[in-house]
Amino acid sequence: MPAVAGRADRVIAASLDLERILSLVRPSATSLVSMFHGEDHWRQVASIGLDLAARTPGCDPIVVVLFAVLHDAQRIGDDPDPPHGARGAALARSLDLGRFGFSREQLALMEAACRDHTGGGLSDDPTIGTCWDADRLTLWRVGIEPAARYMSTAAAREAAASGRRFTRVSNWAEVARRLGRPAVRARSPVRRQR
């Protein structure tokens, strides 16, 4: 993205070139075809993350989608691999994603979310928390029921507590379409006047 005077600090959803980013990540991905941590999982994390982001004030959905694509891209096998998050963050740095117009803040959040997602902690940051929660809400795929106490955001705690299963997304075009829509924030109760 060429430099433009007065350019916004954040990339807007409509300008995210998801297919181009995927074309950069796929050749370096060590988990691409994994049944548990491969591209299908990345897509599900992106989709769930967008659902949570729409209900989490202050969350950056662009960072959530970038996290989804990169968080497990450097995982080696499906057995425990604690350093894979740091390798995913390093891959993100090596791809020079700033050239797509992402702000330093967005890239720093995405790298932190990737690097630290393997630690099992919670985050007060709405974007990082949403990233981690979206990943944890896919634990059904490995036979683990997601628990509300391991969720950072109210939206994810509600989903886990209710046992909600999210609709599977079969292609990235659906993720990109949903990302292009303005986020729908949770509505506050409105009193009707009579």
Image (tube, rainbow, N blue to C red):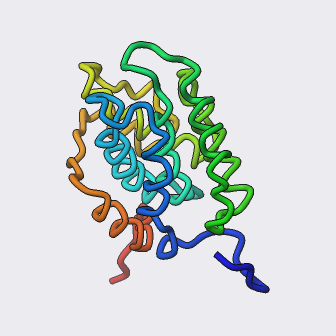
Position of 93 with respect to 117 (left or right) is: right
Position of 116 with respect to 166 (left or right) is: right
Give the quarter of the figure containing the C terminus: bottom left
Position of 4 with respect to 38 (left or right) is: right
User: Residue at the location (61% across, 67% down)?
Assistant: 100
User: Residue at the location (59% across, 39% down)?
Assistant: 113
Residue most extreme to the right: 5
Q: Is residue 87 visible?
A: yes
Q: How many marks?
A: 0
Image position, residue 32 (x, y; %): 36, 37
Image position, residue 14 (x, y; %): 47, 75
Which is more toward the observer, 125 or 2?
A: 2
The image shows residue 42, relative to residue 56, as above or below, that is above
Instruction: Tell me which corner region of the image, top left, top right, bottom left or bottom right, holds residue 189.
Output: bottom left
Q: Is residue 188 visible?
A: no
Image position, residue 135 (x, y; %): 41, 36
Residue most extreme to the front: 27
Image position, residue 94 (x, y; %): 66, 46
User: Residue at the location (60% across, 40% down)?
Assistant: 91
Which is more toward the observer, 33 or 123?
A: 33
User: Residue at the location (55% across, 73% down)?
Assistant: 12
Give the quarter of the figure containing the N terminus: bottom right
